[in-house]
Amino acid sequence: MATPRILVVEDSKTMRFYLQDLLKKEGYLIETASNGKEALEAIEESQRLNNAFNIVITDVVMPEMDGLELLQKVKEINRDIIIIVITSEATIETAIRALNLGATNFLRKPPNSKEILDVVWRASRLKELSFESEELIPFMTRTLYMEIPSQIRLIKGISHNIIQEAKLMGYDERELRDKIPVTIDEAVTNAIRHGNKGDESKKVKIQVDINTEKIKIVIKDEGEGFKVQEVPDPTDPKNFLKMSGRGILFMRLSMDEVVYNDRGNELTLIKYKYPKE
């Protein structure tokens, strides 16, 4: 693994130089900033140069921009950057808030060298494990299986879990958020309302297989099914305003393949990671 790049953000010149010297002696690549605003500019520049920081160590109380605001903005730019906050005993609640916002760990002021090196080593190890996991992605298939009662309120959670698993396989989260929720909402709502007729004793089974090529979602209800061929072609302009088949239209616009079984109670949806030529 490449040597971690660390940005130390600390308004105290003494503490900033102390952390810089300590970590440099351990072989880390160190840059510094005296406040959150300066740090954010350095992080944005590193992203533009495709040379992102791996770890940010930041004080909480600083002029220009405090550590918590910096933390939030960094996570918006690159969620993979590991953030360690420095806080005093008097602001331990702030440290807890930082952890809830996505910080990986915190150091209490005044930090001792052993604690600093231990926390940073743990952070660098997390990054190393992340890289090791990425090497396995081409050989992996992530599978989700859910069997839910016919309750509409459960649908939102299905989309969330699919997106999180696909993100780990390198899919574009922003594109998935545009495609997956509307597709799952239509497909599972149809399975509950039209397939199972709203009968909560009947189940909807969802299996999701995700690899580096595609996301495959199979949704099956326990209803009698329907004749798919009798649904008006939703892609025909004269049927655009008809409610019947509109869900199929939405799904076809979001997914690359939409296929029902002969009985009409099982739907297969496929989204390719890259467009097919």
Image: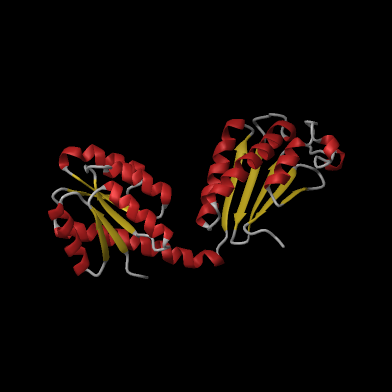
* Residue situated in front as seen by the camera: 216 or 124: 124
The chosen color scheme is: secondary structure
Residue 273 is left or right of residue 46, and the answer is right
The image position of residue 28, as x and y in percent, is 26, 67
The quadrant holding residue 100 is: top left
Q: Confirm whether residue 104 shows in the render.
A: no
Query: Left or right: 213 with respect to 265?
Result: left
Choose top left, top right, bottom left or bottom right for residue 115: bottom left
Whether residue 150 is situated above or below residue 145 in the rendered picture: above
Q: Is residue 30 visible?
A: yes
Q: In this view, does 263 lie above or below 29?
A: above
- Above or below, 212 against 77 in this view is below
Residue ID at (67%, 34%): 189
Quarter of the image with the N terminus in it: bottom left
Q: Where is residue 176 in the image (x, y as percent from the top left)?
A: 58, 48
Instruction: Count the marks.
Output: 0
In this view, the residue in front, 240 or 65, is: 65
Task: Name the residue rendered at 53%, 50% in the picture.
Answer: 173
The one of 83 and 137 positioned closer to us in this rendering: 83
Q: Which residue does the image show at 68% across and 29% down from the upper left?
A: 199
Where is residue 271 shown, x and y percent of the image?
Answer: 66, 53
Q: Which quarter of the rendering shows the C terminus?
A: bottom right
| Residue name at image x 42 percent, y 65 percent | 131
Drawn side of residue 131 relative to residue 210, left or right: left
Q: Where is residue 164 in the image (x, y as percent from the top left)?
A: 51, 49
Instruction: Kindly indicate the quadrant of the structure image that contains residue 212.
Output: bottom right
